[in-house]
Image (cartoon, rainbow, N blue to C red):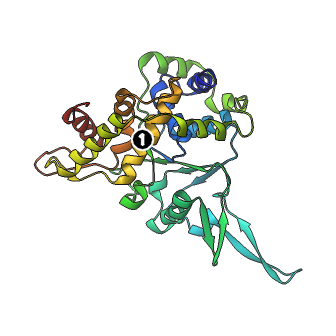
């Protein structure tokens, strides 16, 4: 299993150069059955990373370009009257796919963004009073431009909290960028990718994630992290129980990718910035607004039992 997952990371690394950590976090998020938010500047490979993972994992893939005029029906689907049969037929939208890429999600209005809330939480959508299940597995990978850019609408807290992880890709280092500039077009390379996982194999890996052991001492550590975020004056808003579950699921997935059947404190510390940075808010006394810095502050403030 570890060899297969390492191969997925390696093959993705041929497309997204010099970003192994981001690739591993993204894969861990999908193994933990979570949704992923990639926030970064335009042009650093957010969309390519999502497309690469979809192809390597053998997932049915759909992409929505979020814009200010996007409507919920453009995401979920719409019923159209069939004159031959004299009835309305539902035409599914792109949300009915195994991996949905919500590209530049914060360029759409809150009304369009909210169309994904039920899908992300319950893996189903309700249209015209009828509940329709989504494919299994179902993931949302959303890309987001920095909020200071023109034409963006900030995601509400309720939607941010539905993302298991938020990661950044960042600029490549000089060596990786030189290889990128001198190499082939990334989308041409994407066309040549073959799935590395057979049908149903990803679900099997996800089941194995749930079997990774979490000791009582490690649960004490995670509870201490949650409690410190709620009681310390450094944070204006503490981590929710959902955030605690996100930490556990992500740490289990990371341990599995490392070839272990038990979670170590180092696994928790490795995934903590990705799982908590979009959920933490610094107090006025702290003077820190960046979520990644708050996550590091939390790690340094709580000792491993």
Location of residue 78 with respect to 276 vertically, above or below: below
In this picture, residue 186 sits left or right of residue 240: right
Quadrant in the rendering for residue 166? top left
What x and y, as percent, mark residue 211?
54, 37
Q: Nearer the viewer, residue 170 or 226?
A: 226
The kind of secondary structure element at disc 1 is helix
Residue ranking furthest to the right: 84
Residue 179 position, x and y percent, is 53, 17
Q: Which residue occupies the extreme front position in the image?
A: 216
Q: Tell me if residue 70 comes above or below residue 4 in the rendering.
A: below
Residue displayed at 39% across by 61% down: 158
Residue under label 1, please give it.
248
**If the image is split into quadrants, where does the C terminus sit?**
top left
Q: Residue at x 68, y 54 (%)?
A: 135
Asked whether residue 41 appears in the rendered view, the answer is no
Expressed as whole percent of the image width and height from the top left, the position of residue 255 reads 47, 29
13 is higher (above) or lower (below) than 123: above
Query: Residue 217: image x %, image y %?
Result: 32, 34
**On the picture, is 59 further left or further right than 257?**
right
Position of residue 30 in the picture relative to residue 304 (left or right): right
Total marks shown come to 1
Q: Residue at x 40, y 58 (%)?
A: 155
Residue at the (35%, 51%) spot, across then down? 147
Q: Is residue 6 above or below residue 53?
A: above
Any part of residue 26 in sight: yes
- The quadrant of the picture occupied by the N terminus is top right
In this view, the residue farthest toward the top is: 175
Quarter of image, res 80: bottom right
Query: Is the residue marked by circle 1 packed among few (<14), some (14-19), or many (20+) residues within 10 Å?
Result: many
């Amino acid at each position: 299993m570890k060899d297969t997952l390492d191969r997925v990371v390696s093959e993705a690394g041929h497309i997204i150069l010099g970003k192994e950590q981001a690739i591993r976090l993204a894969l861990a998020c999908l193994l933990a059955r979570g949704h992923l938010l990639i926030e970064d500047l335009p042009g650093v490979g957010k969309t390519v990373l999502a497309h690469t993972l979809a192809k390597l994992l053998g997932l049915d893939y759909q992409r929505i370009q979020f814009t200010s005029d996007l409507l919920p029906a453009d995401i979920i689907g719409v019923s159209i009257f069939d004159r031959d049969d004299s009835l309305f037929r539902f035409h599914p939208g792109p949300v009915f796919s195994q991996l949905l890429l919500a590209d530049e999600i914060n360029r759409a209005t809150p009304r369009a963004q909210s169309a994904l809330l039920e899908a992300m939480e319950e893996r189903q959508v309700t249209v015209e009073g009828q509940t329709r299940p989504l494919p299994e597995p179902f993931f949302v990978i959303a890309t987001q431009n920095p909020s200071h850019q023109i034409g963006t609408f900030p995601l509400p807290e309720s939607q941010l909290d539905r993302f298991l992880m938020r990661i950044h890709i960042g600029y490549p280092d000089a060596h990786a960028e030189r290889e990128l500039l001198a190499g082939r077009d990334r989308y041409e390379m994407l066309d040549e990718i073959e799935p590395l996982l057979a049908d149903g194999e990803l679900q099997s890996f996800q089941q194995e994630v749930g079997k990774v052991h979490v000791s009582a001492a490690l649960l004490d550590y995670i509870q201490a992290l949650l409690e410190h975020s709620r009681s310390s004056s450094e944070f204006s808003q503490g981590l929710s129980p959902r955030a605690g579950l996100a930490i556990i699921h992500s740490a289990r997935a990371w341990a599995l990718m490392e070839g272990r059947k038990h979670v170590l404190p180092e696994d928790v510390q490795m995934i903590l910035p990705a799982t908590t940075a979009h959920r933490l808010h610094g107090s006025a006394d702290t003077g820190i607004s960046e979520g990644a810095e708050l996550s590091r502050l939390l790690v340094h403030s709580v000792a491993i039992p």
